[in-house]
Image (cartoon, rainbow, N blue to C red):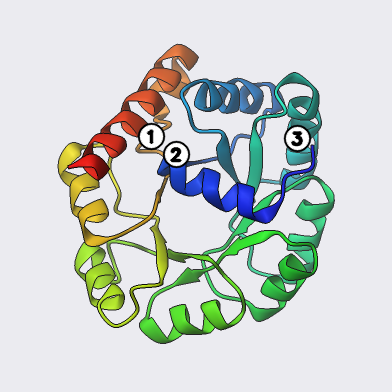
């Protein structure tokens, strides 16, 4: 499915939360990702962490290209350009990293793929924007200053779009602090797709939690 960069960026901001997930079992990945999509989170960040993760990703993207083309598969934990290229060739529509790498930005820009690098300072965020990054990941969110850091950056740079990952919970208190600080979306891993839900194979529970989180974010944004 051909999805342009602006469509992906708009979808990320609209849903407000990006589920961050990895599992070595392709079938588990399919079920979790479909549950997230059914709950309203069509953009999913698959983390590049396990052995043969690119092969798992390829199988998953091939599945959703037929089963549910509305799913937008992205990849996270990307730290170098060759790995980014592998995932783009395997169908990634956006790339996320724990750090900023200019070569990854160039690869993504050549293919019109959204790139959200991890940044921990105003200078890194500025450099990421010079490289063409529309949504910048703040990572680890809680360690670099949390919502107060976001407010401090957006004061002199109101055009910046920030997505924190790390230190974001599904609670109204946590999400309110982040969104009132000015973030455009948040990344959430085990706080959203919990170990308890996974162990129980409770995919309906995952769908419910995703749906409730998106609804909560929309309520917060509307206040």
Q: Nearer the viewer, residue 5 or 207?
A: 5
28 shown above or below 214: above
- Viewer-nearest of labels 1 and 2? 2
* Residue under numbered circle 3: 61
Q: Determine the residue positioned at 45% across, 20% down.
A: 207
Q: Position of residue 64 (x, y in %)?
A: 73, 27
Q: Determine the residue positioned at 18% across, 38% down.
A: 172
Q: Determine the residue positioned at 67% across, 28% down.
A: 25
Marks 3/1 in contact by CB < 8 Å: the verdict is: no
Q: Position of residue 83 (x, y in %)?
A: 75, 62
Instruction: State the quadrant of the C terminus.
Output: top left
Going from the N terminus, do you reach mark 3 or mark 2 first? 2
Q: Secondary structure at mark 1?
A: loop
For the question of whether residue 14 can be seen, the reply is yes
198 shown above or below 180: above
Instruction: State the quadrant of the N terminus.
Output: top right
157 shown above or below 141: below
Going from the N terminus, do you reach mark 3 or mark 1 first? 3
- Examine the image and state in which quarter residue 37 appears: top right
For the question of whether residue 47 can be seen, the reply is no
- Viewer-nearest of labels 3 and 2? 2
Point out which mark residue 192 bears: 1
Question: How many circles with numbers are drawn on the protein?
Answer: 3
95 shown above or below 156: above
Label 1, label 2: how many angstroms apart (C-alpha)?
A: 14 Å
Specify few, some or many for label 2: CA neighbours under 10 Å numbering under 14, 14-19, or 20 or more. Answer: many
Label 3, label 1: how many angstroms apart (C-alpha)?
A: 21 Å
* Residue under numbered circle 2: 15
Q: Position of residue 14 (x, y in %)?
A: 45, 42
């Amino acid at each position: 499915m051909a999805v342009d960069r602006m469509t992906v960026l708009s979808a990320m901001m609209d849903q407000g939360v990006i589920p961050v997930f990895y599992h070595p079992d392709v079938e588990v990945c399919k079920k979790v990702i479909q549950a997230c999509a059914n709950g309203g989170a069509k953009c999913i960040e698959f983390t590049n962490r396990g052995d043969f993760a690119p092969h798992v990703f390829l199988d998953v993207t091939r599945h959703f290209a037929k089963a549910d083309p509305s799913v937008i598969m992205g990849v996270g934990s990307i730290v170098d350009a060759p790995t980014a290229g592998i995932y783009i060739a395997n169908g990634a529509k956006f790339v996320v990293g724990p750090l900023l790498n200019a070569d990854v930005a160039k690869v993504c820009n050549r293919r019109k793929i959204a790139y959200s690098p991890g940044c921990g300072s105003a200078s890194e965020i500025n450099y990421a924007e010079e490289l063409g990054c529309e949504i910048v990941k703040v990572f680890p969110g809680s360690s670099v200053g949390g919502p107060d850091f976001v407010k401090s950056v957006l004061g002199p740079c109101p055009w910046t779009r920030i997505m924190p990952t790390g230190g974001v919970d599904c609670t109204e208190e946590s999400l309110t602090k982040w969104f009132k600080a000015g973030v455009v979306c948040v990344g959430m891993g085990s706080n959203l797709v919990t170990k308890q839900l996974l162990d129980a194979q409770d995919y309906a529970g995952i769908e419910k939690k995703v749906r409730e989180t998106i609804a909560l974010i929309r309520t917060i944004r509307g206040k």
